Image (spheres, helix red, strand yellow):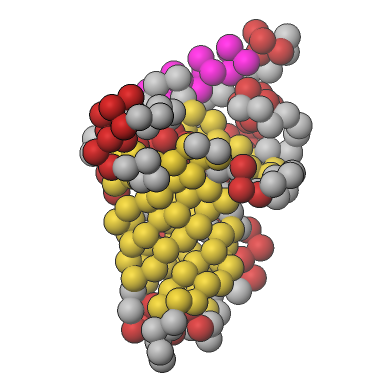
Amino acid sequence: MANDAMPPAQQRRGPAEPLPASEAPFDAIGLARHLLRSVRSGALATIDAIDGTPFASLVTLATDSDGTPLMLLSRLSAHTRNLDKDPRASLLFSVGGKGDPLVHPRLTVTGRAARSEEPRIRERFLARHPKAKLYADFPDFGFFTLAPAAGHLNGGFAKAATLTSAELLLDLTGAEALVAGERGAVEHMNADHADALALYAAGAGEPGTGWRLTGLDPEGLDLMAGERTARVLYPEPVRDMGSLRKSLVAMAAAARAGSGTDAPPPHPEA
């Protein structure tokens, strides 16, 4: 079509350039955050420490409370040696699926990697990858974060957008108590409310049983059953444990009403 028939934002950037997420005609921020929270492995691209050649490898992934990507890496791996020399890196989050792989959404996050000794980082990663407990404490392994600088989202055919760090991550201001109480709430929900977790997962399009809560944040819940994951959003963001309790009770009630079950409402503990 003629240039003057294009949307103003596209006229400024050219037909092949992705729009900023805030101008995209779809929920680019929501989709990008969903990929961050639901993908458990992806491609890590680093810069070769010897000759600067791009080097890609497969790593397992989790997220911190705000969505910062987390990794558990061995010092014996080439990508770790590369990061020790140059922390610049990118991660590819892709869900995959049947048919043409290019029609499925994927997200590339660029930033700088850094080692972390923060206990919460360890807890959240191992909750997402329980088998990693077998080697997480080996002396040659360490936890890393990737502080996002930018994101590039391809949501499928004709769906592309760029994202800022602020659009990728959650602002945790005012949610400190929620972050501090996360582990207790997770343990309580897993011990006493497996039925409610199954209802939440089914409501997010992931039916079945065996779901466990691996983490929570101001925007939603991270669930896992075997190798399956489910990201469940609250009706509204929460900033404290009281709001979380009310939201989970309301979500369970709505799910029970929709499914015809009579499971008791959850009461997560701080």
The region drawn magenta spans: 240-255
Where residue 163 appears, as percent x and y from the top left, is 33, 44
Residue drawn at point x = 50 percent, y = 37 percent: 158
Where residue 239 appears, as percent x and y from the top left, is 32, 30
Residue drawn at point x = 29 percent, y = 56 percent: 149
Q: Vertical placement of 192 versus 103: above or below? A: above
Question: Is 183 on the left or on the right of 161, as rendered?
Answer: right
Q: Vertical placement of 99 versus 236: above or below? A: below
Answer with the quarter of the image where residue 2 lies: top left
Quadrant housing the C terminus: top left
Where residue 44 appears, as percent x and y from the top left, is 50, 67
Q: Vertical placement of 186 versus 236: above or below? A: below
Residue drawn at point x = 44 percent, y = 45 percent: 153
Quadrant housing the N terminus: top left
Question: Is 53 on the left or on the right of 99, as rendered?
Answer: left
Question: Is 30 on the left or on the right of 58, as rendered?
Answer: left
Question: Is 130 on the left or on the right of 241, as rendered?
Answer: right
Observer able to see residue 257: yes
Taking the magenta stretch, the answer to whether it contains residue 241 is yes
Q: Vertical placement of 145 versus 49: above or below? A: above
